[in-house]
Amino acid sequence: MKSLLPVVAAAGIAVSCLMAASDAAAFNASAPHVAPAPRTDVIRVTTEPQGQVKPQFQRRVVRLVTNEAPGTIIIDTNNKYLYLVEGDNRARRYGIGVGREGFGWSGVVKVGRKAEWPGWTPPPEMRVREAKKGHKLPAYQEGGEDNPLGARAMYLYRDGNDTAFRIHGTNQPWSIGLNMSSGCIRLMNKDVIDLYDRTPVGTKVIVVGPGNRQGEVSYQDRGIDLFRTMFGG
């Protein structure tokens, strides 16, 4: 069955900055209350307010018919879904943002490496392109809540070489469901953390997009798995 089959459409993480405990001696009758100092070694995840992401792009467990092996990732860039195949007609479905016009791609790759709170090195051509628009990009940006790669990144390789494409988080959750990246696959931070924890290095990733360079891939989304949604598993 070709990948163009229709997909059946079916908070966010807020990690509080940990506060260091105050010394008990600061709380006595003769001394005023002293607010505990915030820890500087904890990076906060930007809160993703409710209502920014359409309901159909929230993470779901679905009934997915496919002959791909459990653990495989199938990315449907046309319908803006990423599937993590779990076997027995089961999968986890995540809403994604994908490449804007002219930046779409397809193919079969692997997760070559992974990183938590990754730093970002914009490609030289991106820096030139954005400079023409009046946007000056840094040569390198440390990881953190304002980093374009978000909370996690999985680097996609082909034949042992970095493709420069990533599956990563985003500090722009409203972009999920849209075509606006330079070819990378973005998820909400809470979703990329969930996927990252389930995805080892070496995972096969099938990207279904322009050019059909992924070859034949059979999958059919039959909608939300109500039993698993209600009872777990």
Image (cartoon, helix red, strand yellow):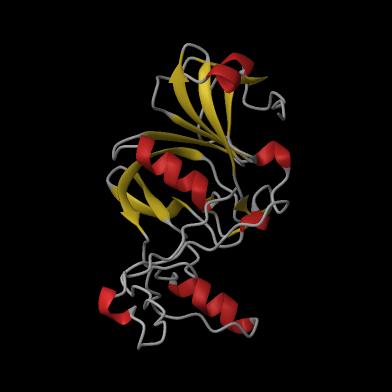
* Position in image of residue 5 (x %, y %): 69, 23
Task: Name above or below for residue 56 compared with residue 18.
Answer: above
Question: Of residues 132 and 191, which is closer to you in this image?
Answer: 191
Q: Residue at x 58, y 50 (%)?
A: 12
Question: Of residues 207 and 10, which is closer to you in this image?
Answer: 10
Residue sitting farthest toward the top: 88
Q: Is residue 100 visible?
A: no
* Position in image of residue 113 (x %, y %): 29, 49
Q: Quadrant of the N terminus?
A: top right
Task: Name above or below for residue 163 compared with residue 230.
Answer: below
Q: Is residue 174 visible?
A: yes
Question: Of residues 2 and 195, which is closer to you in this image?
Answer: 195
* Position in image of residue 89 (x %, y %): 52, 13
Q: Residue at x 53, y 41 (%)?
A: 106
Task: Name above or below for residue 88 compared with residue 134.
Answer: above
Q: Quadrant of residue 94?
A: top right
Q: Residue at x 62, y 56 (%)?
A: 173
> Along the horizontal axis of the image, is 67 left or right of 220?
left
Q: Residue at x 64, y 17 (%)?
A: 226
* Position in image of residue 231 (x %, y %): 55, 17
Question: Of residues 107 and 50, which is closer to you in this image?
Answer: 50
What is the tally of numbered marks visible in this picture? 0
